[in-house]
Image: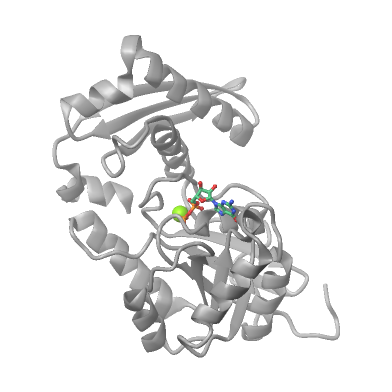
């Protein structure tokens, strides 16, 4: 622990379009998997807290869902989360993809109105030449009075430590909010359901972008094995067919890859039982949304 400098602590909101690498960054800086990653939009549906405690202090990250215009009830909830994370934030990290030139005027306005120090994070620099990153910096540097402009690769870790040090520069002095052992506040059930949903998203191609919901009914930690029973909800019979697959091949694969990750997580043998159910229009169901709370 540092003796000559005061410890700092604060909240950091990760915002930006879907697929720019926010969750990948969070997992990288946390050095463990706290948020699921996929190449599908709207993968992250709920704020995930990553709590990083170092010699300098404590950073609490909100990984917000991607910003978009509310359409379904679920999306309204996600937008509320985004607004709340901006209200709570001490520092905003606004992520863009080095290759994506779309102007996010909606997001920029949200950041402007928040009046908080905002960094622009230009991610995925591993994919392109340095000159491309420099071009992108030139494009965005005058859009707002950025506190910092930081090109990174969340995937390889380039500049992630530098970014962490920059964040600390802007955090207020203060004691830890959470104990040092805590690194996330999501429940085990939620994390397990997200891991399973990640497998569904990654193993189905483009057919099922927003239409799955996973509910974990039981996690029983027995002496030698963790028993988990979960349901995967889809909206139509044909989607159920996709998730189950030919001769149940896909659901088997979802179960196998999910079980492997869960065994890593629990450090124990896992018995995973999965059921696929049809729940039409679940995105507008308050019951299902309450389940996501
Ligand atoms: P989010 O929607 O903003 O949370 O984005 P994700 O973290 O889920 O990442 C979306 C996709 O981009 C995934 O396929 C990631 O593997 C990929 N990705 C994220 N960061 C990087 C990066 O720094 N470099 C490269 N090449 N790919 C990345
Ligand atoms: Mg995400």
Number of numbered markers: 0
For image coordinates 49% across by 67% down, the residue present is 96
- Left or right of 66 on screen, residue 266: right
Residue in front for this viewpoint, 69 or 56: 69
Residue in front for this viewpoint, 139 or 200: 139
Vertical side of 201 occupied by 170: above or below: below
For image coordinates 73% across by 66% down, the residue present is 161
Vertical side of 253 occupied by 98: above or below: below
- Left or right of 37 on screen, residue 274: left
Residue 221 visible (yes or no): no
Residue in front for this viewpoint, 35 or 149: 149
Residue 245 visible (yes or no): yes
Residue in front for this viewpoint, 131 or 286: 131
Which of the 4 image quarters holds residue 205?
top left
Q: Residue 289 appears at what percent x and percent y?
A: 24, 50
- Which quadrant of the figure contains the N terminus? bottom right
For image coordinates 63% across by 84% down, the residue present is 170
Q: Residue 260 appears at what percent x and percent y?
A: 57, 26
- Which quadrant of the figure contains the C terminus? bottom left
For image coordinates 50% across by 80% down, the residue present is 140
Vertical side of 141 occupied by 293: above or below: above
Q: Residue 157 appears at what percent x and percent y?
A: 69, 57
Vertical side of 275 occupied by 204: above or below: below
State the colouring used for the structure image: one colour
Q: Residue 257 appears at what percent x and percent y?
A: 52, 26
- Left or right of 42 on screen, residue 139: right
């Amino acid at each position: 622990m540092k003796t000559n400098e005061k410890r700092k602590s604060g909240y950091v909101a990760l915002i930006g379009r879907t697929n720019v690498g926010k969750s990948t960054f969070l997992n990288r800086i946390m050095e463990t998997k706290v948020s699921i990653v996929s190449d599908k939009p709207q993968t992250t549906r709920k704020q995930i807290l990553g709590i990083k405690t170092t010699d300098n202090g404590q950073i609490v990250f909100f990984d917000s869902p991607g910003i978009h215009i509310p359409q379904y009830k679920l999306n309204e909830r996600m937008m509320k989360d985004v607004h709340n994370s901006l209200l709570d934030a001490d520092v905003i990290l606004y992520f863009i993809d080095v290759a994506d030139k779309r102007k996010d005027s909606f997001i920029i306005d949200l950041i402007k109105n928040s009046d908080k120090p905002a960094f622009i994070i230009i991610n995925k620099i591993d994919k392109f030449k340095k000159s491309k990153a420099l071009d992108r910096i030139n494009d965005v540097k005058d859009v707002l009075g950025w506190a910092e402009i930081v090109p990174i690769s969340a995937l390889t870790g380039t500049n992630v430590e530098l970014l962490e040090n920059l964040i600390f520069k802007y955090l207020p002095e203060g004691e830890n909010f959470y104990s040092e052992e805590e690194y996330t506040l999501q429940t085990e059930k939620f994390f397990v359901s997200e891991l399973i949903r990640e497998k569904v998203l990654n193993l189905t191609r483009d057919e099922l972008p927003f239409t799955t919901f996973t509910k974990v009914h039981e996690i029983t930690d027995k002496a030698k094995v963790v028993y988990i029973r979960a349901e995967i909800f889809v909206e139509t019979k044909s989607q159920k067919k996709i998730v189950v697959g030919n001769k149940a091949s896909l659901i088997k694969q979802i179960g196998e890859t999910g079980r492997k990750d869960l065994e890593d997580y629990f450090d124990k043998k896992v018995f995973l039982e999965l059921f696929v159910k049809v729940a039409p229009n679940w995105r507008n169901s308050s019951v299902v949304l309450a389940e996501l709370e």
